[in-house]
Image: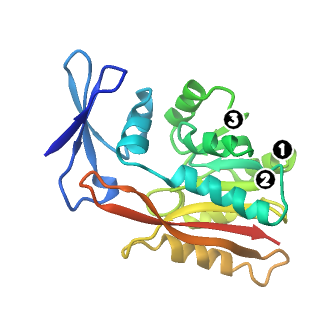
């Protein structure tokens, strides 16, 4: 069974509402203005980003994804409670800039983005020109390059909405990137929180491992929220987590 919607671009999207699929298995049918149809896996980000407006239409509007706004709000809330202003952010798993735009709208200076696919960088520059001064591409980023960027651009926030965990940025890679940030910096994430997901446990273990270091990371925000709905209509819950490096 499928549901369809006609966007301004002229194409239509039909969601595959087959129940029981994991997020990585969800698919939809894209019908082009000339009548040609194309079945696309939702997590085929290279293809999704290549069609202007498609990610926003399917993920943000149709599936009501709240992670970008939630992580931005949590970061600003945590910084505000500590009297911190003027955050300068690195947007990890930046995609075409949806999260970066939410951060910018809340007064955060978005300096850098990164994603695993080059099509994401192309889409970000196409859809939100000027949002990112730097945009890195790679499944595992060069830690030395990130360290230089953090230092030279005086970055103070590492943000990742749904970009850490299985199939995305590994937690050990996140730990290396977080090490590059100076004391007083904030780490803001949304993480899958289902019974079969270990993302939260792994990240909290990463933070706990800093307890005996010179600059431990302390969690200041931790709450559950509705990430989005699945194509079958099931509510999917994530955890938003913000930590500060002391």
Q: Which mark is residue 153?
A: 1
Residue 63 screen position, x and y as percent: 36, 48
Q: Which mark is residue 17?
A: none
Q: Residue at x 21, y 62 (%)?
A: 20
Q: Label 3 near label 1: C-beta < 8 Å?
A: no
Looking at the picture, tell me which residue is in the foreground, 166 or 70.
70
- SS at mark 1? helix
Task: Say which residue label 2 marks.
Answer: 147
Q: Residue at x 41, y 71 (%)?
A: 197
Mark closest to the chain's N terminus, 1 or 3: 3
Label 3 Cα crowd, 10 Å radius (few <14 / some 14-19 / many 20+): many
Residue 137 makes an appearance in the image? no
- SS at mark 3? loop
Label 2 Cα crowd, 10 Å radius (few <14 / some 14-19 / many 20+): some
Q: Which mark is residue 132?
A: 3
In the rendered structure, the answer to whether residue 64 lies left or right of residue 165 reads: left
- SS at mark 2? helix
């Amino acid at each position: 069974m499928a549901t369809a919607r006609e966007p301004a671009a002229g194409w239509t999207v039909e969601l595959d509402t087959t129940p029981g699929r994991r997020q990585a298995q969800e698919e939809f049918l894209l019908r082009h203005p000339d009548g040609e149809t194309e079945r696309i896996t939702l997590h085929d980000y290279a293809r999704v980003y290549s069609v202007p407006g498609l990610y926003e239409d399917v993920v943000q509007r149709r599936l009501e994804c709240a992670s970008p706004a939630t992580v931005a709000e949590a970061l600003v809330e945590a910084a505000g409670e500590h009297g911190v202003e003027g955050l300068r952010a690195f947007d990890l798993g930046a995609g075409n800039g949806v999260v970066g735009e939410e951060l910018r709208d809340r007064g955060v200076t978005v300096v850098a983005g990164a994603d695993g696919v080059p099509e994401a960088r192309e889409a970000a520059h196409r859809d939100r020109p000027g949002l990112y001064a730097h945009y890195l591409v790679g499944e595992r980023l060069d830690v030395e390059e990130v360290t230089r960027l953090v230092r030279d651009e005086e970055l103070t926030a590492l943000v990742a909405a749904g970009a850490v965990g299985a199939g995305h940025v590994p937690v050990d890679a996140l730990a290396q990137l977080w090490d590059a940030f100076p004391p007083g910096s904030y780490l803001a994430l949304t993480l899958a929180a289902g019974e079969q997901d270990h993302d939260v446990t792994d990240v909290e273990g990463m933070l706990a491992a800093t307890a005996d270091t010179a600059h431990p990371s302390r969690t200041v925000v931790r709450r559950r929220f509705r990430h989005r709905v699945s194509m079958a209509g099931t509510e999917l819950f994530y955890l938003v987590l913000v930590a500060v490096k002391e």
